[in-house]
């Protein structure tokens, strides 16, 4: 004892120990990570911040599993990274939130570890369309969040809300529309098919796609802006410069709540319902924890929290939710939505892209 | 001090650093891009190393030909606009008091600190119906009601010229300041009007500088992809816009690379042609 007390402590040793101690305290996640942990990939920026703040901390409290959130790049870069890492036996994230097209592309390479429905009792809460399945029936992904793209208008310019997507074709709206510029994020082919061709099944054949494109080409004189940058359209919509178009329901609602003269309408043909799913990399060694996490996210209470705090549309059935009508209307609608034909963006992406670009730029 | 031609390997030493930089930051990325442009695109996935010509074949179509033609035309138009406005401006600037010159140059240089995004958004506001310049004209009684000037070709041209103008002045300025004033004085003594003296003496004396400026602005304008998107209609989108679409949104790297390689080759060809023509004229 005496010897220890008398042992000369070098200045460096003290500093070193102090630093180590401080950094341990500063990173409680590291301490917990020694027990149970999970790396979760979420779209960087707003989504990751919201999830960190509103979801992950509570999840750790409830389950004892520490979450390390990873910011995913947009586009398909993350899919490529996961794929290449999985080939090397590594997983940059155990669970990732993926777009529907990315889920399909991952399925083609067997990237996603099949999920066990028995370990996901809460998944029965989900609306059926939010369960991604391999062609042989194995579960590849589980719906994480969804969001609507709707028909938006400036209330100063349009006193009456439009009721149908057909407003896009109305000659009275010449040079007044702002639409998304890419075939793969505007989903306007589906809107055209549902509004004028009897449903999205009309896009099953190449001829059907061409027909939809020809019909869609008729809106060109009405389009003032084909936007890639959301901020550009949002600003023009608020000022009335471009008084009508397609935009995100949640963001438009937030802008209206801030007092801007904008409204979002669910047309009678339905809003466009896009979504992200949780999927587990086959290289992940934390499938147990991943199941716990995904099951946790399928609880109606968590989906309601997401709707209130992040503005996403719930993936679980309406009657299970404690959302008020007003809260539900802020993020969703009971009108049957237009579901994008994600399969086409996987199997015919180059054909669609080429024809689309020729249609709008030609 | 006389300059000796380099004798030993060590004499070439100072060249190694720039050569290394050029290799690392230009040759290697460009070679990678050429390699990728021959890779096999996999529609459902990404790409596989291979040697296929599909990506170039897809580009050789009337549609992409038109886009390429428009991009080149736009870049040439911007270059000419910059030079036509830039020469008289810089000429007049070079004859003002030093203080005024410094003030102008600082103001012009500050434009360079603005990003393309800011320039694009600023012009789209200036050209808008709700908050734009036409409101001023209405107030002055020149117009009956405000109207939107964007999206249009004119809006794209204006913003791109605005963006490239500081470079134009920076390249022209040293040559115009150094221009011997006795040349124009001689022309004036011999009876030429100031305008005639400008066109028959100043412009020809600056021929090489003008050519260099044209080429620089042309290449600068060719890479623009944000302004045509923000201020133009789809038919005003340049090839750079479509390259971005393919690379970022379609993850079709091979096709994007093939388009980029094609654009670089056409650019190099045009620049070579311009330089050759300039030299021929000088020799004549």
Image (cartoon, grey):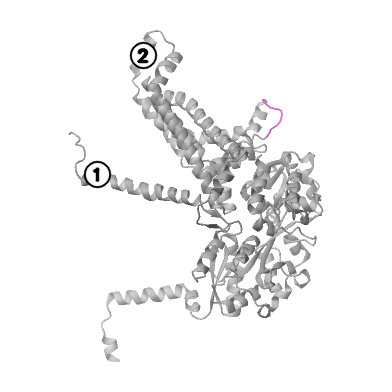
- Image: A227 above or below B123: below
Q: Nearer the viewer, residue A162 or A188?
A: A188
Q: Nearer the viewer, mark 2 or mark 1?
A: 1
How many numbered tags mark residues here? 2
Q: Residue at x 76, y 50 (%)?
A: A192
Quarter of image, res A294: bottom right
> Residue A135's spot in the image, x, y percent?
69, 68
Q: In the drawing, does residue A162 fall left or right of residue A342?
A: right
Q: Residue at x 75, y 38 (%)?
A: A174
Quarter of image, res A129: bottom right
| Chain label for disc 1 | B
Query: Which residue lies most toward the left here?
Result: B1
The answer to whether residue A154 shows anywhere in this view is: no
Query: Which residue lies most toward the bottom here?
Result: A1
Residues rendered magenta in the picture: B142-147
Residue matched to label 2: B185
Q: Residue at x 50, y 37 (%)?
A: B221
Most common secondary structure along the magenta stretch: loop
Quadrant of the drawing holding the N terminus of chain B: top left
- Image: B126 above or below A81: above
């Amino acid at each position: 004892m005496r010897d220890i007390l008398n042992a000369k402590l070098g200045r460096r040793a003290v500093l070193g120990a102090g630093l180590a101690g401080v950094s341990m305290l500063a990173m409680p996640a590291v301490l917990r990570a020694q027990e149970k942990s999970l790396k979760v990939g979420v779209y960087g920026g707003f989504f990751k911040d919201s999830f960190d703040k509103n979801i992950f901390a509570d999840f750790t409290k409830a389950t004892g599993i520490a979450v390390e959130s990873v910011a995913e790049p947009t586009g398909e870069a993350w899919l490529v990274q996961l794929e290449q890492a999985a080939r090397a036996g590594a997983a940059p994230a155990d669970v990732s939130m993926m777009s529907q097209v990315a889920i399909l592309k991952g399925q083609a390479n067997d990237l996603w570890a099949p999920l066990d429905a028995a370990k996901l009792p809460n998944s029965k809460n989900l609306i059926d369309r939010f369960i991604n399945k391999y062609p042989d029936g194995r579960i590849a992904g589980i719906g994480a969040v969804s969001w609507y793209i709707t028909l938006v208008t400036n209330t100063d310019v349009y006193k009456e809300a439009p009721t149908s997507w057909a407003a896009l074709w109305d000659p009275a709206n010449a040079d007044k529309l702002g639409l998304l510029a890419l075939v793969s994020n505007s989903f306007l082919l589906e809107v055209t098919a549902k509004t004028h061709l009897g449903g999205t099944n009309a896009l099953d054949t190449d001829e059907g796609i061409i027909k939809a494109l020809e019909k869609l080409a008729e809106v060109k004189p009405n389009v003032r802006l084909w936007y890639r940058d959301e901020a550009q359209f949002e600003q023009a919509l608020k000022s009335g410069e471009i008084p009508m178009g397609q935009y995100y329901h949640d963001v438009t609602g937030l802008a209206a709540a801030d007092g801007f003269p904008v409204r979002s309408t669910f047309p009678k043909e339905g809003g466009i319902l896009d979504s992200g799913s949780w999927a587990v990399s086959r290289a992940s060694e934390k499938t147990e924890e991943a199941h716990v996490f995904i099951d946790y996210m399928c609880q109606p209470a968590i989906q309601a929290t997401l709707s209130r705090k992040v503005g996403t549309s719930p993936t679980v059935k309406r009657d299970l939710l404690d959302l008020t009508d007003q809260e539900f209307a802020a993020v969703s609608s009971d009108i049957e939505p237009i579901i994008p034909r994600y399969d086409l963006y996987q199997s015919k992406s180059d054909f669609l892209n080429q024809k689309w670009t020729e249609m709008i730029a030609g | 001090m006389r300059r000796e031609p380099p004798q030993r390997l060590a004499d070439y030493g100072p060249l190694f650093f720039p050569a290394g930089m050029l290799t690392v930051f230009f040759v290697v990325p460009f070679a990678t891009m050429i390699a990728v442009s021959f890779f096999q695109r996999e529609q459902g996935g990404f790409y596989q190393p291979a040697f296929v010509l599909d990506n170039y074949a897809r580009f050789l179509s009337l549609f992409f030909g038109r886009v390429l033609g428009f991009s080149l035309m736009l870049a040439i138009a911007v270059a000419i606009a910059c030079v036509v406005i830039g020469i008289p401006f810089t000429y007049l600037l070079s004859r003002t008091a030093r203080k005024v010159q410094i003030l102008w140059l600082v103001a012009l240089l500050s434009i360079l600190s603005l990003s393309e995004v800011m320039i694009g958004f600023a012009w789209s506001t200036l050209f808008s119906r709700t908050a734009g310049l036409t409101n001023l004209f209405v107030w002055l009684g020149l117009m009956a009601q405000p109207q939107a000037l964007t999206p249009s070709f004119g809006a794209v041209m204006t913003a791109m010229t605005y963006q490239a103008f500081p470079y134009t002045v920076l390249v022209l300025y040293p040559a115009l300041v150094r221009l011997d004033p006795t040349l124009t004085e001689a022309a004036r003594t011999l009876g030429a009007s100031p305008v005639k003296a400008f066109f028959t003496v100043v412009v020809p004396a600056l021929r090489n500088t003008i050519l260099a400026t044209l080429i620089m602005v042309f290449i600068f304008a060719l890479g623009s992809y944000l302004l045509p998107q923000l201020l133009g209609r789809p038919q005003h989108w340049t090839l750079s816009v479509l390259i971005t679409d393919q690379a970022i949104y379609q993850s079709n790297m091979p096709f994007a690379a093939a388009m980029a390689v094609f654009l670089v080759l056409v650019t190099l060809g045009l620049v070579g042609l311009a330089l050759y023509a300039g030299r021929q004229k000088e020799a004549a």
